[in-house]
Image: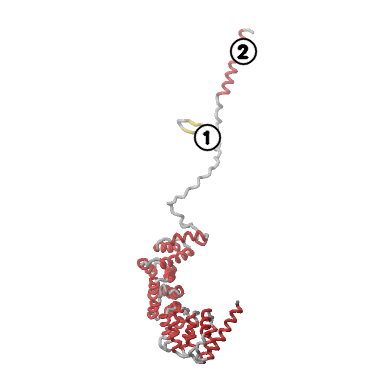
Amino acid sequence: MKIRDKLILGIATFLLLGAVAWWLFVPAPAPPSAKQTNRATGPRTSETSPAPIAKTPQPKPVPVPDPQASAPADNPHPQKMFSEMAVLERGKIMKEIREKDINAIFQHFLDAGRVENDPMKQGAVQNYLAYALRDRPPNPVFLKKLQEFIESDEASKFERKMALGALSFAATKETVGLLIHEALNLKDKELRDSAVACVRDVGDIVSGTLEKDDFTPKLTAMWFATNDPKTMLSTAQSIGRIGSASGVEVLLSAALAPDGKDDARREKAAYGLLKVTQATAVPPLAAILEKYPPGSQENTVAFRTLNQIRDKTAAEAVLKWLQTADSSAVPLVTSWYSAARSRPQMEAVQAVLDAKAPFRSEEIRKAFRAGLDAYRAKYEQEK
């Protein structure tokens, strides 16, 4: 090969290798539509470039609530209602409330109704307020606060009535004293009537528990302090339900008053005597029974009231009197058996008959024996 031809071939080879190296290592220019970035002027877009492709939207992070921020106005207290809670959950909440002092319990009572709008919870807290008033040492400062609450027009009547109910249910000398004061002095008639009804309930609550508190003196003072028929009736029923001897004496005195002498009080006292069921009432009733003859108003009232008392002492009082009565009292023996008799009463009759105690009238003895045999037959049949 000639030198000239070798030179031409070498130049061609060099150019070919340079072209290959250029193609491999030099990047291709950007297309005209792409953004060009200049460090001095920033990004610029060609006027002829098409609209940029939309980016795929990314989910926004869930905001974390600020514990200090106030709740939305349309649901300021999103906690569950008492009716939506399980029994154990409600019990846990109420246990925490009951362990607080009485002022805090009272505030929970208000908040349950005013803030949480939960009547079921407010009723439960009302009960615990009554328990606190009953079980803890008297607190004159709090009682004064409660009195001002009941007498103030700022609270709703519903809440004030519930407070009166707590006083009644607590049934201590302090709460009953305040309740009687409100029943006699509240200006609002609706609230006063509610307080009067709560006074009646006191007798049902403390019936048979005179060893703890006897409210008869307070109720007797109320009985004589009022001329309002509703107040007299509630007071008489409460006195009768408690059934202390002194209270029954007050009712007997009014119920046996002559016609034309305070007829309204006499009528209400008779209703009060219908509530007597306690053995503590036997002594004054037995005294009236023995003092007046069968058929008299006094004897009839005493006998009927003793018939309501299903206690052995009442049966013994009736038996003692009938042993000295004449045959005109035989129908009363039948009447006595017609009432529901208890086993202790039947045992008292059996003891008198077994002892062969003297009866003024043998017909009365026979009537007692016949009644006892009928009771035994019925009892055996029911067994």
Q: Give the label, 2 or 1, closer to the camera.
A: 2
Where is mark 2, residue-wise? 9
Residue situated in front as seen by the camera: 252 or 189? 252
Q: CA distance from mark 2 to mark 1?
A: 48 Å
Who's the residue at 52% across and 33% down the image? 35
Tag 1, which secondary structure? loop
- Of label 2 and label 1, which has the lower sequence position? 2
Type of residue at label 1?
Answer: Glu
Residue 224 in view: yes
The residue sitting at the front extreme is 355
Where is mark 1, residue-wise? 47
Q: Residues within 10 Å of mark 1 (few under 14, many from 20)?
A: few
Coordinates of residue 88 in the picture (x, y in percent): 51, 59
Is the residue 336 above or below the residue 111 in the image?
Answer: below
Residue 157 in view: no
The residue sitting at the right extreme is 1
The residue sitting at the left extreme is 141
Type of residue at label 2?
Answer: Leu
Tag 2, which secondary structure? helix
